[in-house]
Amino acid sequence: MLVVLALVVLVVAGPLRRGRAEAVEASDSARRAALEAAKEAKYAEIRDAELDHRMGKLSDEDWRAQDRTLRAEAIEILRRLDDL
């Protein structure tokens, strides 16, 4: 009787375990997509700041400070991507 009960539990719980694994995989995929989008947006911000500096809209000092901040944020995004 216990063996039959254990088999029933395994059969019923099988799809539930697979569903949970698929949900985790979908969650990881969504997080990866969000981080990839954030990475591309940060790269665009870096390029925009460089363009503003070349066009004279940002002083050397302001550009260096902004560039340092943007690149630190980009590195953090890349680290989070690596962690996934």
Image (cartoon, grey):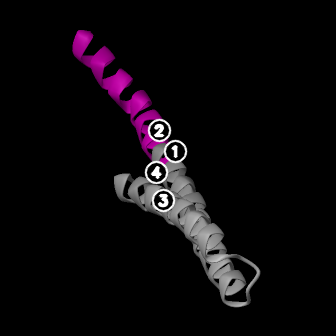
> Which element carries disc 2, helix, strand or loop?
helix
Residue 2: in magenta span? yes
The residue singled out by tag 4 in the image is: 25
Crowding at mark 2 (Cα within 10 Å: few <14, some 14-19, many 20+): few
In the image, is residue 33 above or below residue 1? Answer: below
> Which element carries disc 4, helix, strand or loop?
helix
Residue at 37%, 31% in the rendered image: 11
Which residue type carries mark 4?
Answer: Glu
Q: Earlier in the sequence, mark 3 or mark 1?
A: 1
Which residue type carries mark 2?
Answer: Arg
Give the x, y percent position of residue 64: 55, 70
Which region shows up in magenta?
Answer: 1-23
Which residue type carries mark 3?
Answer: Ala
In the image, is residue 65 above or below residue 12? Answer: below
The residue singled out by tag 2 in the image is: 20
Q: Earlier in the sequence, mark 3 or mark 2?
A: 2
Instruction: Please identify the quarter of the rendering in which residue 65 is found.
Output: bottom right
Residue at 30%, 24% in the rendered image: 7
> Which element carries disc 1, helix, strand or loop?
helix
The residue singled out by tag 3 in the image is: 72
Instruction: Please identify the quarter of the rendering in which residue 6 is found.
Output: top left
Q: CB under 8 Å between callouts 2 and 1?
A: yes
Side of 65 where 16 appears, left or right: left
Q: CB under 8 Å between callouts 4 and 1?
A: yes
> Which element carries disc 3, helix, strand or loop?
helix
In space, the residues marked 2 and 1 are separated at their CA atoms by 5 Å
In space, the residues marked 3 and 4 are separated at their CA atoms by 28 Å
